[in-house]
Image (cartoon, rainbow, N blue to C red):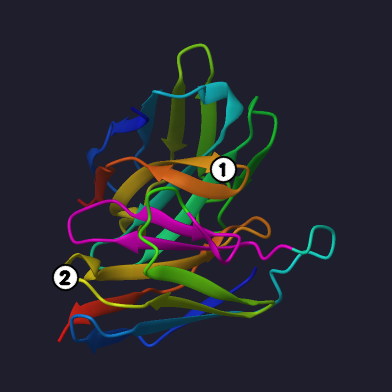
Amino acid sequence: EVQLVESGGGLVQPGGSLRLSCAASGFTFSSYWMNWVRQAPGKGLEWVAIINLDGSEKYYGDSVKGRFTISRDNAKNSLDLQMNSLRAEDTAVYYCARGSGFIIDIWGQGTEVTVSS
Amino acid sequence: DIVMTQSPDSLAVSLGERATLNCKSSQSVLSSSDNKNYLAWHQQKPGQPPKLLIYWASTRESGVPDRFSGSGSGTDFTLTISSLQAEDAAVYYCQQYYGAPLTFGGGTKVEIK
């Protein structure tokens, strides 16, 4: 069974940092692009970042560029999102999502991040 | 960036009736190199993560009931639910993957009348 399990969410103060992780199973992780997508409380979906098969290409949404870093470890079937200089508006559920190229075809259950003092 | 605009924001449809959801992109997502529309539809039920329904504007993902269909090209797209079932109550998002940044529409909430 294809599965994506996020972890690392929690409460963090404005200006702080947090690292999210996503454990992938049930498919050949190294054969897929991977994404992070977020959803603020009661709001729609916002794409955050994408990384290619070997980690050599990364793209970011404008709202997180320069603050967030996406990375992957194909040996461990894992995807990470390092989030720095966090703001209240970064409060959201963060989803790990598999990409067939740029087509998002599998979503994780999400991990909740709250930025508040 | 490509802006995706969905309409209506919400609609209430009776069981067994047709639901029509619209999505418009600020620039064409039709590729001249492969003649494909880089447009997907995702369904999100309350308390659940989204689920891919349709990609390439009209290709149903495996396991998606055939009452769901996608159409359109260029900048204007439609998701049609031919005969609404109770389990179809959800928010539906269109998303372009023509290029980064990937962008989603604001969503259309479908309710049962």
* Magenta span includes A72: no
Dot 2: chain letter: B
In the visual, does A103 lie left or right of A57?
A: left
Q: Which residue was labeled with disc 1?
A: A50
Residue B10, image x, y percentages: 29, 84
Q: Is residue A41 visible?
A: yes
Asked if residue A43 can be seen in this view, the reply is no
Kind of residue indicated by mark 1:
Ile
A23 lies left or right of A60: left
The N terminus of chain A: image quadrant: top left
Which residue corresponds to mark 2?
B86
Q: Nearer the viewer, residue B73 or A82?
A: B73
Question: Does B50 appear in magenta?
Answer: yes
Instruction: Please report the residue visible at 65 percent of the width from the left and 79 percent of the height from the top.
Output: B75
- Residue A26 percent location from the top left of the image: 39, 23
**Image check: B71 left or right of B11?**
right
Q: Residue at x 46, y 24 (%)?
A: A27
What residue is at 19 percent from the left and 65 percent from the top?
Answer: B87
Whether residues under marks 1 and 2 lie with C-beta atoms below 8 angstroms apart, the answer is: no
Q: Nearer the viewer, residue A70 or B46?
A: B46
Please tell me whether residue A21 is drawn above or below residue B109 in the rendered image: above
- Could you tell me residue A66's position as x and y percent? 57, 46
The amino acid type of the residue labelled 2 equals Ala
